[in-house]
Amino acid sequence: MLFFILPAGLQAQDPVHTCPNVYKKVLLNNEQVRIIEIEFKPGDVADWHTHPNHTAYALTEAKLEIAEKGKAPVVAELKAGEVIYIPAITHKAKNIGSNTVRMIVTEIKSSTAAR
């Protein structure tokens, strides 16, 4: 998403590039947001990647193990229709549930433009 403005080291952590097994399709990408459709099959892992501030909207029930660098993993459970806000993060995630998880992730890009 921010590959045109991120330092080279962070570009390698863009989930669309590092986790194509999970980050399936960029639905919208403009100066304000990048919206991505994701799909985790049971046992799928999205290896280490970085997001700016973002939201995740669960299209299906989700049970994910989330590991943030330097912290113990936590389990996140969402029901279909729930949405969560997540501050900027570097993490990895694993579907530890029994169903395929589908979500819409909206990454919020920083903007210096006046509103």
Image (cartoon, rainbow, N blue to C red):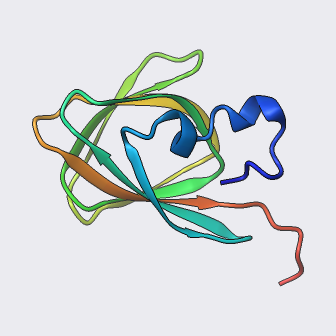
Q: Residue at x 22, y 27 (%)?
A: 43
Q: Residue at x 64, y 44 (%)?
A: 88
Labels in figure, total = 0
Quarter of the image for residue 94 reads top left
42 to the left or right of 103: left
| Left or right: where 69 falls relative to 66 | right
Q: Position of residue 35 (x, y in %)?
A: 51, 64
Q: Is residue 89 above or below residue 59?
A: above
Residue 9: x percent and y percent?
77, 28
Q: Residue furthest left?
A: 98
User: Which residue appears at 12% of the width and 42% of the height?
Assistant: 99
Q: Residue furthest bottom?
A: 115
In this orientation, which residue lies closer to the viewer: 12 or 105? Answer: 12
77 with respect to 74 (left or right)? left
Quadrant where the image shows the C terminus: bottom right
Spot occupied by residue 33 in the image (x, y as percentages of width and height): 63, 67
Q: Which quadrant would the N terminus be assigned to in this image?
A: bottom right
Q: Is residue 98 above or below residue 105?
A: above
In the image, 14 versus 99, the foreground residue is 14
The quadrant in which residue 66 appears is top left
Q: Which residue sits at x=21%, y=38%?
A: 41
